[in-house]
Image: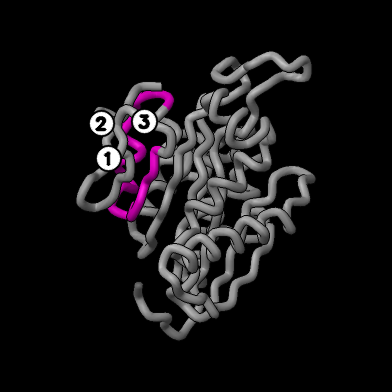
Amino acid sequence: MKKTKPGTCWFFVDESGDPTFYDRKGNLIVGHPGCSPILVLGYIELSDPSPVRKAIVELQENLVHDPYFRDFPSVKSSTAVAFHAKNDLPEIRYQFFKLISAFDIKAHFIVARKIERVFRNNFHTRENEFYDHLIEIIFEGQLHRQENNLIYFAKRGSRNRQAPLEAAIRVSIQRFEQKWGARVDTLHSVQAQTPLGEPCLSIIDYMNWAVYQAFTRQEMRYYSTIEEKVSLLIDLYDQQTYPKNWYNRKNPFDINKITPL
């Protein structure tokens, strides 16, 4: 167990995909149009987000005012607000991935295959329990390293999930304390934000999207641009690959290593 260091660490958290399993009539719709086969949760870690924010805003302004992009509707409605991998033009996506590759960041991801048996038995068919479990796992062992930890979650729609997310973070700390027989005395705060208010959230949006494309479309080209930033990727429910379903520097992630969806 590493000793706590002075200073502040910033975490920026987002997801790709959704935690939905059933439609309003209770029919299983995982993998159907509009319902993802996986849920990806990821975060980036920064020691100083200020220069990163500045670089993102500068690139955004340059692209939005570039005559080449001026008349594209998605640039006016989406990119001018914040970078979003799903909505941005391929040319803009390429520029932003290049920018990410220049940043000094670390990223962690957890991929949850949406298996109905697991959803019923482990999470009582409750989407929030499914999502919060991923929070508990991905933050275990992370919040004892720095004295102060600021955790920004991407806000989605009108959902108010502040209290449950804080509870999930506390569980992750408790899991770590029980595992190591140690007490975590560091500080942490949790708050929801939008990419408009916090540009760093656009980075994890893009990186999650790259992971999602690799799993669902077997496209590694996007992931390849950010793989040097990835410290950990957990393919949580890939039982056929277990125990090698935790990918890191020694066991780099590649789509050819996983069990196909």
Q: Which residue is mark 2?
A: 257
**Mark 2 surroundings within 10 Å by alpha-carbon count, few (fewer than 14), some (14 through 19), many (20 or more):** few
**213 lies above or below 130:** above
Is residue 256 at all visible to an observer of this figure? yes
- The earlier-in-sequence mark between 3 and 1 is 3
Residue 149 at x, y percent in the picture? 54, 72
Q: Which residue is mark 3?
A: 239
Q: Quadrant of the N terminus?
A: bottom left
Q: Quadrant of the C terminus?
A: top left
Q: Are marks 3 and 1 in contact (CB under 8 Å)?
A: no
Residue 188 at x, y percent in the picture? 60, 72
**Mark 1 surroundings within 10 Å by alpha-carbon count, few (fewer than 14), some (14 through 19), many (20 or more):** some
Q: CA distance from mark 2 to mark 1?
A: 9 Å
* Stretch in magenta: 216-235
**186 lies above or below 152:** below
**145 lies above or below 36:** below
Residue 100 at x, y percent in the picture? 39, 54
Q: Which residue is mark 1?
A: 244
Please identify the quarter of the rendering in which residue 31 is found: top right
Q: Amino acid at mark 1?
A: Lys
Residue 166 placement, left or right of 244: right
Residue at image location 47% in from the left, 42% down from the top:
208
Q: Amino acid at mark 2?
A: Lys
